[in-house]
Amino acid sequence: MDQLPSLVAQAQDLARELGFPLTREEAEPGRASASLPGVGRFLAVLAAGCGGGLIGELGTGAGIGTAWMASFMPDDCTLITAETDERLAVAVRGLLDGDPGMAGRVQVITGDALSTMTGRGPFDLLFADSGLRDQADFSALVSGLRVGGRLVMDDVTPALALPDGSPLRVSDPKRQLFLGEPRLAWTEVVLPDLRNSLLVGTRRS
């Protein structure tokens, strides 16, 4: 998987055209950035196992995470992705409409990511990339997973990569969400760059 799938490369080009940051370093404080290649490859591995299933993404952005999952999910799998920014949602719809293999398999919704996903499950895979921080909202996401379904959240910094004195060494909001949800078995996956990680949980009950 060293070479980028065509749809992912197109999504990266789209991000550049839209001025959407490709890395956390490029993004202004509080602004979203695109899924890193390491995250995309991890999502691709999970999506490839969702035969006949349903994948949900909260926060489409420029469609890079979407493209990773769509490129590797089985033909009988469906992906729903939600984005609050109508400009981004329209652009990603255009990208996917240009790929005949995506017809009827990927749906881009404009609107609040959490509310648009509510009631659409059960999901086999959820990628929460929308800045969710509330425990009740997180619990609602877990309720939308089937037992055995997986929830992924990125943009986490490994503890050893945090500067001395960082409050995140003591308590990280994203890790606290996973810690506070007893229905999940979860772990942190450090990416090859050793500067970024993601959290992944499997619903066990």
Image (cartoon, rainbow, N blue to C red):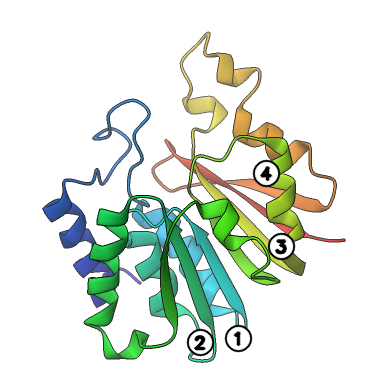
Judging by the rendered image, the residue that carries numbered circle 4 is: 137
Question: Rounded to the nearest whole Å, what is the CA distance between mark 2 and mark 4?
Answer: 29 Å
Question: Rounded to the nearest whole Å, what is the CA distance between mark 1 and mark 4?
Answer: 27 Å
Name the amino acid, label 4. Answer: Asp
Question: Rounded to the nearest whole Å, what is the CA distance between mark 4 and mark 3?
Answer: 11 Å
Name the amino acid, label 1. Answer: Gly
- Given residues 175 and 61, the one toward you in this image is 61
- Given residues 82 and 173, the one toward you in this image is 82
Q: Nearer the viewer, mark 2 or mark 3?
A: 3
User: How dense is the environment of label 4, judged by Cα within 10 Å: few (below 14), some, or many (20 and up)?
Assistant: some
Judging by the rendered image, the residue that carries numbered circle 3 is: 144
Q: Nearer the viewer, mark 2 or mark 4?
A: 4
- Given residues 84 and 172, the one toward you in this image is 84
Nearer-N-terminus badge (4/3): 4
Question: Rounded to the nearest whole Å, what is the CA distance between mark 1 and mark 2?
Answer: 6 Å
Judging by the rendered image, the residue that carries numbered circle 1 is: 51
User: How dense is the environment of label 1, judged by Cα within 10 Å: few (below 14), some, or many (20 and up)?
Assistant: some
Q: List x then y, in percent, for residue 138.
A: 68, 45
Q: Is residue 180 above or below residue 19?
A: above
Left/right of residue 43 with respect to residue 120 in the rendered view? left
Do the CB atoms of the residues marked 4 and 3 lie less than 8 Å apart?
A: no
Nearer-N-terminus badge (2/4): 2
Do the CB atoms of the residues marked 1 and 2 lie less than 8 Å apart?
A: yes
Q: Nearer the viewer, mark 1 or mark 4?
A: 4
Q: Quadrant of the N terminus?
A: bottom left
Nearer-N-terminus badge (1/4): 1
Q: List x then y, in percent, for residue 84.
A: 40, 50
